[in-house]
Image: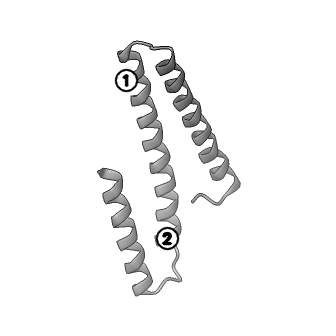
Amino acid sequence: MPHSPQEKKRVLARVHRIRGQCEAIERALVAEAECASILQQIAAVRGAVNGLMSEVMEAHIRESLGNNELSDAERAEHVQELTSLVRSYLK
């Protein structure tokens, strides 16, 4: 998780935009908008969520592996955790 005030503010702003995009999809569905328009909005949300995931993952990698005080075992544990995260992200 991003810990600096700037990173946290940026990530929260992304989440707020994603929430707004999801609400727009809901309104479009209620209004029975055209499928192509709804699909385009869904694709935009997917891209926004991928961007959020990328930003948080990058901060986590910097935090986890950038710590020079970790033992080899701790570093290996972090690598395993990150590998699992990347696999779930790519599914």
Is residue 31 positioned above or below 25 on the image?
A: above
The residue at the point 50 percent across, 45 percent down is 52
The residue at the point 50 percent across, 14 percent down is 31
Position of 69 with respect to 84 (left or right) is right
CA distance separating discs 1 and 2: 37 Å
Mark sitting on residue 60: none
Front: mark 1 or 2 = 1
Q: Amino acid at mark 2?
A: Ser
Compare residues 52 and 58 and report the one nearer the observer.
52
Residue 40, horizontal then vertical, whole percent = 39, 22
Residue 54, horizontal then vertical, whole percent = 45, 50
The residue at the point 39 percent across, 70 percent down is 81
Instruction: Give the structural element (helix, strand or loop) at label 1.
Output: helix
The residue at the point 41 percent across, 21 percent down is 38
Name the residue beneath numbered marker 2: 64
Label 2: how many Cα within 10 Å (few below 14, some 14–19, many 20+)? some
Name the residue beneath numbered marker 1: 39
Label 1: how many Cα within 10 Å (few below 14, some 14–19, many 20+)? few
Compare residues 87 and 24 and report the one nearer the observer.
24
Q: Earlier in the sequence, mark 1 or mark 2?
A: 1
Is residue 79 positioned above or below 48 on the image?
A: below
Compare residues 25 and 76 and report the one nearer the observer.
25
Is residue 40 positioned above or below 6 on the image?
A: above
Quarter of the image with the N terminus in it: bottom right
Residue 53, horizontal then vertical, whole percent = 46, 49
Q: Amino acid at mark 1?
A: Leu
Is residue 12 positioned above or below 82 on the image?
A: above
